[in-house]
Amino acid sequence: MISASIFLGVVGPWQIAIIVILVLLLFGGKKIPELMRGLGSGIKEFKDASKEDNKEENK
């Protein structure tokens, strides 16, 4: 099996800077906080659901 790191390499500061610039260009500065809020609430809901699932399994 071929590792993904062979194709992707190591993500350095230049690659991160390019990704940030592309995101800013695509979504604009005003949309990014809204996107991050949505992402955060989605992660919170996922964690809550997984905790509830673990409680049901332990009963």
Image (spheres, rainbow, N blue to C red):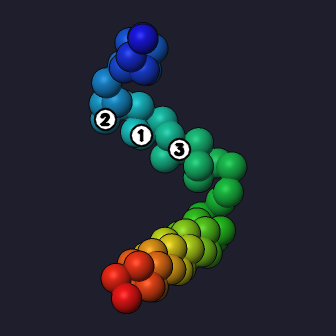
Q: Amino acid at mark 2?
A: Pro
When asked about the image quadrant of residue 54, the answer is bottom left
Q: Nearer the viewer, residue 16 or 9?
A: 9
Q: Is residue 43 above or below residue 18?
A: below
- Give the percent coordinates (x, y) of residue 22: 59, 42
Residue at horizontal 41 percent and vertical 31 percent from the top: 15
- Mark 3 lies on a secondary structure that is helix
Cβ–Cβ under 8 Å for marks 1 and 3: yes
Residue at horizontal 49 percent and vertical 46 percent from the top: 20
- Give the percent coordinates (x, y) of residue 27: 67, 57
Q: Which mark is residue 13?
A: 2
- Mark 1 lies on a secondary structure that is helix
Q: Which mark is residue 17?
A: 1
- Mark 2 lies on a secondary structure that is helix
Residue designated by label 3: 21
Q: Is residue 16 above or below residue 52?
A: above
Q: Report crowding for label 1: few under 14, some 14 to 19, many 20 or more residues within 10 A (C-alpha).
A: few
Cβ–Cβ under 8 Å for marks 2 and 1: yes
CA–CA distance between discs 2 and 1? Answer: 6 Å
Q: Residue furthest front?
A: 59
Cβ–Cβ under 8 Å for marks 3 and 2: no
